[in-house]
Amino acid sequence: MSGNAPAIHDPAHWDSVSTNYAAEADRMTGRYAQAAWELAALPKGARVLDVATGAGALLVAALRDGADAVGIDFSPGMVEIAQARAAEVTPGQRALVMDGQSLDFPSDHFDAAFSIFGVFMFPEPAAGFAEMARVLRPDGLAVVSVWENAGGAGPAQLFAQAAQRLFPDQPVPLPMARLFNAPELLDAAFVEAGLQPVAVHSVSYAWPAPPVDWFRDHAKLAYGWSPVWQLLDEAQRTAFAEEAAALAADLPPEGITSTALVGMARKPD
């Protein structure tokens, strides 16, 4: 991939934050992955694909429930972590480096295909939805989760607010290549891919407000994908993190409530 690619579309960016992502962000997003897995209610032994597996939260949940699951991600760093986690559950290669916009699997192959906060960030989300549809068997289930808030979830929302305060002349970008953050938008993406929408579930959890040091140490994790971040020098990045920490100080004790939409659709027979 070109070095000029936006960070969110660059595997090297995700490699650079993979360890922190596994330790921090996945600890929170993993709850949404577990909820999506339980909502799908698949039988044991189902053949499952996890697109943009990240640190493997959905993949591991599926393997623990007896699914024949594999996860793919374009970031080798993320795949290494997901594979290590999968190996604690079952033997074999369960995580692969692969582009979710061009899957190296046969058509009509999987009983279910998931993408937990992944496909909406692709350069071409429609290609990701289409590939998920292609590899599903007839009547197979597609499950896609997105954030209801277009700015993301948890601390990412505070970083977006900090960017607006510190750099009012800079437009604050969104992590979504296209907006799918309403049920009708998510359903439309399924229909465009040739899938039949089934339901969109709303899942909410509170993210505890991180301490000040978290914002200093993990600003890149929460906002490093942003073009705004790329324009800042180290002093500005420090000020950015401190502004987000100040916003966190005003949060209620329960923290930041973030809602995910979990959309489901089936491939026609």
Image (cartoon, rainbow, N blue to C red):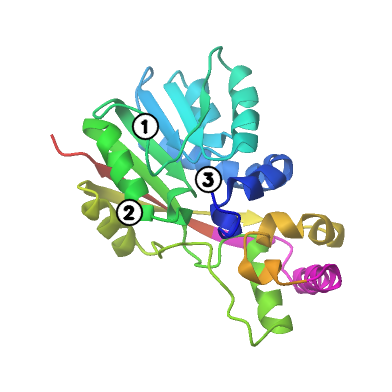
Numbered disc 2: secondary structure: helix
Is residue 209 something that shows in the picture?
no
What distance separates the C-alpha of mark 3 from that of mark 1? 15 Å
Name the residue nearer the viewer: 152 or 37: 152
Mark closest to the chain's N terminus, 2 or 3: 3
* Category of crowding for the residue at label 2, using alpha-carbon neighbours closer than 10 angstroms: few (below 14), some (14–19), many (at least 20): some
The disc labelled 1 sits on which kind of residue? Answer: Ala
The mark that comes first in sequence, 3 or 1, is 3
Residue 114 shown left or right of residue 59 in the figure = left
Point out residue 269 in the picture as x, y percentages from the top left corner: 13, 34
Which residue type carries mark 2? Answer: Ala
Q: Is residue 180 above or below residue 71?
A: below
| Quarter location, residue 211 | bottom right
Q: Decide: marks 2, 3 in contact (CB < 8 A)?
A: no
Q: 96 left or right of 236?
A: left
Instruction: Indicate the position of residue 219 as horizontal and vertical percent values.
Output: 75, 60
Based on the picture, tell me whether residue 236 belongs to the magenta stretch.
yes
The residue lying furthest to the left in this view is 269
Q: Please identify the quarter of the rendering in which residue 251 is found.
A: bottom right
In depth, the one of 177 and 23 nearer the eye is 177
Where residue 209 sits in the image (x, y, percent)? 74, 60
The residue identified by callout 2 is 126
Magenta stretch: includes residue 36: no
Please tell me which of labels 2 and 1 falls first in the chain: 1
- The magenta region covers 233-258
In the image, what residue type sits under mark 3? Answer: Tyr
Q: Which mark is residue 32?
A: 3
